[in-house]
Amino acid sequence: MTQTAHDDTGNETPKPPMIGRNLPQPSRKKAIVDLANDLAPERDAWIEKNRYFHSEDDRYFSFLISEGQKILQLGCGNGRLLKTLKPSYGVGVDLSAGMIEQAQANVPECTFIVGDMEDPELIDSLEGPFDVIIISDTIGYLDDCEATFASLHSLCNRDTRLVVAYYSWLWSPVLKMAEAIGQHVPQVEMNWFSTDDITGLLELADFEPVKMEWRQLVPIHLLGLGPLINRFIGTLPGIRNLCLRNYIVARPMRDAAEPGLSCSVLIPCRNEKGNIEPAVQRLPRFCDDIEILYVEGGSQDGTFEECERVRDAYPQYDIKVFKQDGIGKGDAVRKGFGEARGDILMILDADLTVPPETLPKFYKALAEGKGEYINGTRLIYPMEREAMRFLNFWANRTFSWLFSWLLNQKFTDTLCGTKVMRRRHYERLAANRAYFGDFDPFGDFDLIFGSAKMNLKIVEVPIRYAARRYGETQISRFRHGWLLLQMVVFAFKKLKAF
């Protein structure tokens, strides 16, 4: 009987039937299949025996992968992870016919296929592209990991994420002991990789690791101590590398570049009348189609009127002027990005301390596929005298280290005003904003946290930070420093200790 799935428009599309392949298998593969078939009827019982570990594993996968995506799981077992993730279209592949039979019964809304993920014909038969491809533990059974990773490019688009989960090789003796006393599911001899080994194999296959995380320092409940240790100790730098479970998120790199993109440059402004015209005059024409949006926020010096004058004085440019609906830069960014039409969205602070002349570097980094969220950093090159006060400088350094740990990607400057991303990524971020909520008066962390949550590749572009030429800074060292501390606590709760 033909099964159906729903595509992105809600229409029903036919799902491929279960496929069985009678491939000649080496002795190791045959041993894997025989063991999996024998264990299939007991799989739920083994999961129940290690319920805490599996529930935590599912929770972290649910954090990495939002609901409603097109997901392929290679090595799907009895389908429980796909059921947890609630895909719009889900496909599971496994060597074991016994596991696939259970998976199809457990998750009838998904498609399940008996086959070998190392078989190129099987990969070619799958109907991609997928938003997410999951390889959970199955890497331990593969004969050629690099070739298997490389074969997956045919199932990817530019935004596909490959998620690889595996056990830390440090835990090998513990797992063998657990198996010997009947507390861990029996296994054939498996490959053992460090996180660096896996990232190296991904890079050889033209996948770029975007995020790495380690979870479950204590993989048992232990009367409630396990969850406490895992959330508040197991996530700490250094200690987290001792955890049982590691996760790597990677993106395909073969078609990462996107030439010919249009761009919208958003300039939030409040009491910046003297900088409005210079922003237009100094902005290079770095692509064929540039839109400039001024979003003004209740100025007292005639900034809004100056924005309208500049718009009318430069009809050769596509300039638009808006008043923001609420208060704060975050509200202005949401207003501007909601009105923007460009493929790429940029923020240029109206104080022009980030020189407009540097924006081509940001555009190039995104259009050439070097990154998917481009963040400016003021803390690499020497800056102009009085551009940043001494306490602000060292506070920024400290917070950047903290956020690098919290977000699992390198940051040297979280508060640089220039941030760049694709509009399609921003639309996804906005649609999933409920996870973090309306928490950020700056606008910076809404974009940073959302991009990290979506597993976008974050790249920093160094700029030479200039002193302000007009007006006064609207940053209060102590009030905004306190807000930054609140952001650290908030990020820890939402990104680490959830």
Image (cartoon, helix red, strand yellow):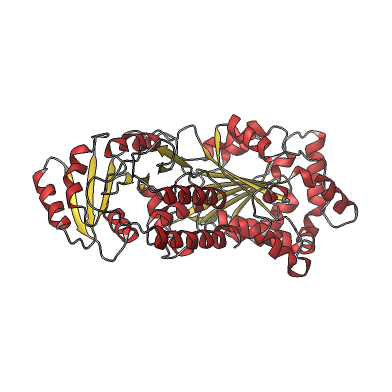
Residue 341: tell me if it is visible.
no
Q: Quadrant of residue 125?
A: top right
| Quadrant into which the C terminus falls | bottom right
The image shows residue 295 at horizontal and vertical percentages of: 24, 55
Q: At 48% from the left edge and 60% from the top edge, which residue is drawn?
A: 487
Task: Please give the name of the residue rendered at 70% of the width and 50% of the height, measured from the top-left corner.
Answer: 239
Q: Position of residue 429 (x, y in %)?
A: 42, 55
Where is residue 43 drawn, in percent x and y? 77, 58
- Quadrant of the rendered structure where residue 382 is? top left
Q: Quadrant of the N terminus?
A: bottom right
Left or right of residue 466, residue 25 in this image: right
* Residue toward you, 186 or 376: 376
Q: Quadrant of residue 39?
A: bottom right
Residue in front for this viewpoint, 70 or 494:
494
Where is residue 224? Give x, y as percent: 73, 69
Residue at the image point whose x is 68% and y is 62% from the top: 55
At x 17% / y 49%, what residue is drawn? Answer: 274
